[in-house]
Image (tube, rainbow, N blue to C red):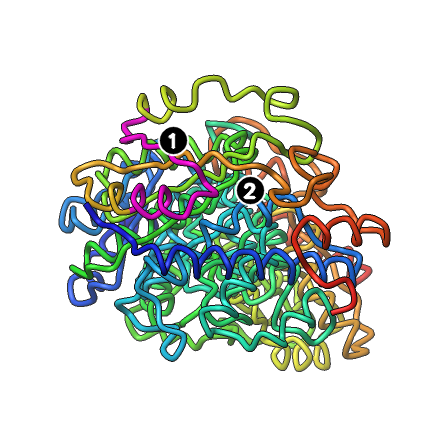
């Protein structure tokens, strides 16, 4: 089984801590953007871009690269921070997020930002696009893999299940789907808004191999993704158990922090929670 | 009678797909109707029938386009501009990916299935999407060219096809230029600008008008976007009236596109709109249905005479 060494785990933890601080600072500064779903997907993005996926900031369009498709596009701020850590964009550029003349649009755009594979934000179509990519790579006998990172609220969309049927029909095994299962969507919890019932049984019934992990545990995510990548002949989904707003005490598990501006007192508390410098 | 538009389309996919493995064909359980099945039988590895899941089909096509393929997305036209529209907008238009939305059964050509299956808003909707080109098939020979042109143009495209065999407008010597209309008949009093099946109706109307001493220029404006601005302005200079004719709503389609050119260039010429007048049609045989709703040479005549004050 693939393993990750302890030193690297500590480094990645440190990187994720920095990404969370940078995220809150910028969203506080610009008073717009989505903190909750960005904080929940932090470790997943960091591991894919910095450790697992075959991507190269010096050659972002390399035909043999792995494709990382963030279908939950509202987590764009955390995606951009991962891209900065991976060297696709300068770290300072994150300060232009959501501003005029920026390459960092409110939601991901492949035309403007190196390393971004698809436009996303509108829910329900990203998995289908990832399946199309995986099938195209197979036709070309290209060994690259496709990773689709989805939100759990996104699973409300009917097209997601159309996509799942296609993934099973075509035995798309060069695709690993990761669901950021934070249990909360814009208007409330999944259970309040649209109960997803037994997701494990649902995906299994749609022909998927279903794995799960702690979506904030570097080692668990690493090992589970490698396990998923080894599964052949059928698609695989990882249900990554996460906390919306992870790391910021008053945001954790709260739908109200899906996309709300961060006030001064809240910013101070968040920096205290994350170990960040309020003046920095 | 010529071959059906859809048969020529399916055969053209095979013809060009045989030597170009970038071509991918997707269908949503209507491949025997759209005739994409002709390609599917020849090249099963590049044919994806995703079931009755049009929105998924359009988004899957985007993934193929992102990896350098040229996906042809097939279903009834009206399902592309409804269920397929999110992907058309996000991946085709916004991302400017090389996706070909192929609108089978355009206009009222699926006449017996009724207004649920007619496509009368498709040109308006796709024309409004940045980066999209919008083209309409005129006849069998033109349809074959449209497939080749779609492969040659790198960018999102909506092509409106038709279900049935239609009268030939073009012969084997016909040529087509991207973005340019074709003048099929010269005349000085009025210019009839048409697309699709209405081109033949316009030619028939022009012939009858000639008998009444009215000479009509007839233009096949198969490229709705980009549109041939120069040809429209030139026609306006020599004509007392512009008549647009389309198997589509008169709101925002060919008529709308021509009106934008006329007003932006200060042409100051009156325009008459032949098309579905903000109504849905009904079930029935194609030819009589088209006549009832004014999609006919007779109505082009009527509107021309009215527009000229005769």
The image shows residue A100 at horizontal and vertical percentages of: 74, 72
Badge number at residue A244 = none
Start and end of the magenta stretch?
A206-225
On-image quarter of the C terminus of chain B: bottom right
- Mark 2 vs mark 1: tell me if same chain: no
Observer-nearest of B301 and A37: A37
Does the segment drawn in magenta span residue A26? Answer: no
> Image check: B80 left or right of B75?
right
Q: Nearer the viewer, mark 2 or mark 1?
A: 2
**Which residue, as the protein is rendered here, is positioned at the far right?**
A264
The correct choice, above or below, for B19 with respect to B275 in the image is below
Along the line of sight, the residue nearer the viewer: B250 or A260 = A260
Residue highlighted by disc 2: A123
Tell me the quarter of the picture where residue A160 sits: top left
Which chain's residue wears label 2?
Answer: A
Asked if residue A3 shows in the view, the reply is yes
The residue sitting at the left extreme is: B42
On residue B52, the disc is 1
On screen, B59 above or below A253?
A: below
Give how far apart the Cα atoms at labels 2 and 1 are: 19 Å
């Amino acid at each position: 089984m693939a393993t990750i060494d302890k030193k690297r785990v500590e480094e990645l933890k440190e990187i994720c801590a920095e990404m969370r601080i940078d995220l809150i600072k910028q969203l506080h500064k610009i008073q717009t953007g989505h903190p909750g779903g960005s904080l929940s997907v932090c470790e997943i993005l960091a591991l894919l871009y910095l450790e697992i996926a075959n991507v190269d900031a010096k050659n972002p369009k390399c035909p043999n690269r792995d494709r990382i498709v963030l279908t939950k596009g509202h987590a764009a701020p955390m995606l951009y921070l991962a891209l900065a850590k991976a060297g696709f964009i300068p770290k300072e550029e994150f300060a232009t997020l959501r501003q005029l003349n920026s390459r960092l649009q409110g939601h991901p755009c492949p035309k403007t930002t190196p390393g971004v594979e698809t436009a996303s934000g509108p829910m329900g179509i990203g998995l289908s696009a990832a399946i199309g990519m995986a099938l195209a790579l197979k036709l070309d006998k290209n060994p690259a893999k496709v990773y689709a990172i989805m939100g759990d609220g996104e699973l409300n969309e009917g097209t997601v299940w159309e996509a799942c049927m296609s993934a099973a029909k075509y035995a798309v095994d060069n695709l690993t789907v990761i669901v950021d299962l934070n249990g909360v969507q814009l208007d409330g919890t999944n259970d309040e808004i649209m109960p997803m019932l037994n997701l494990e049984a649902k995906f299994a019934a749609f022909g998927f191999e279903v794995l799960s992990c702690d979506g904030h545990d570097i080692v668990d995510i690493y090992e589970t993704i490698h396990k998923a990548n080894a599964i052949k002949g059928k698609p695989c989904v990882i249900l990554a158990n996460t906390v919306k707003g992870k790391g910021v005490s008053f945001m954790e598990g709260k739908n109200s922090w899906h996309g709300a501006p961060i006030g001064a007192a809240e910013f101070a508390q968040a920096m205290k929670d994350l170990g960040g410098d309020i003046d920095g | 009678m010529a071959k059906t538009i859809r048969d020529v389309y399916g055969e053209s996919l095979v013809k060009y797909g045989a030597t170009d493995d970038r071509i991918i064909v997707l269908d949503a359980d209507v491949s025997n109707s759209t005739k994409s099945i002709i390609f599917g039988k020849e090249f099963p590895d590049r044919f994806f029938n995703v079931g009755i899941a049009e929105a998924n089909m359009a988004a899957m096509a985007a993934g193929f386009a992102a990896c350098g393929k040229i996906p042809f997305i097939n279903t009834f036209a009206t399902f592309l501009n409804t269920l397929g529209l999110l992907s058309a907008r996000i991946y085709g238009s916004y991302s400017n990916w090389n996706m070909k939305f192929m609108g089978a059964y355009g206009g009222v050509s699926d006449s017996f299935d009724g207004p649920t299956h007619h496509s009368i808003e498709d040109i308006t909707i796709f024309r409004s999407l940045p980066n999209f080109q919008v083209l309409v098939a005129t006849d069998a020979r033109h349809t074959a060219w449209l497939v080749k042109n779609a492969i040659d143009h790198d960018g999102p495209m909506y092509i409106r096809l038709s279900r049935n065999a239609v009268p030939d407008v073009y012969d084997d010597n016909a040529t087509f230029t991207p973005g340019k209309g074709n003048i099929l008949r010269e005349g000085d009093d009025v210019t009839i600008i048409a697309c699709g099946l209405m081109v033949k109706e316009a030619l028939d109307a022009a012939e009858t008008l000639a008998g009444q001493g009215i000479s009509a220029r007839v233009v096949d404006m198969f490229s709705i976007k980009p549109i041939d601005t120069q040809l429209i302005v030139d026609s306006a200079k020599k004509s007392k009236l512009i008549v647009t004719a389309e198997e589509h709503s008169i709101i925002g389609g060919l008529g709308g596109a021509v009106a934008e050119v006329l007003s932006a260039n200060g042409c100051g010429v009156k325009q008459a709109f032949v098309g579905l007048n903000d109504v849905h049609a009904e079930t029935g045989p194609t030819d009589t249905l088209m006549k009832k709703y004014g999609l006919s040479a007779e109505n082009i005549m009527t509107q021309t005479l009215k527009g000229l004050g005769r």
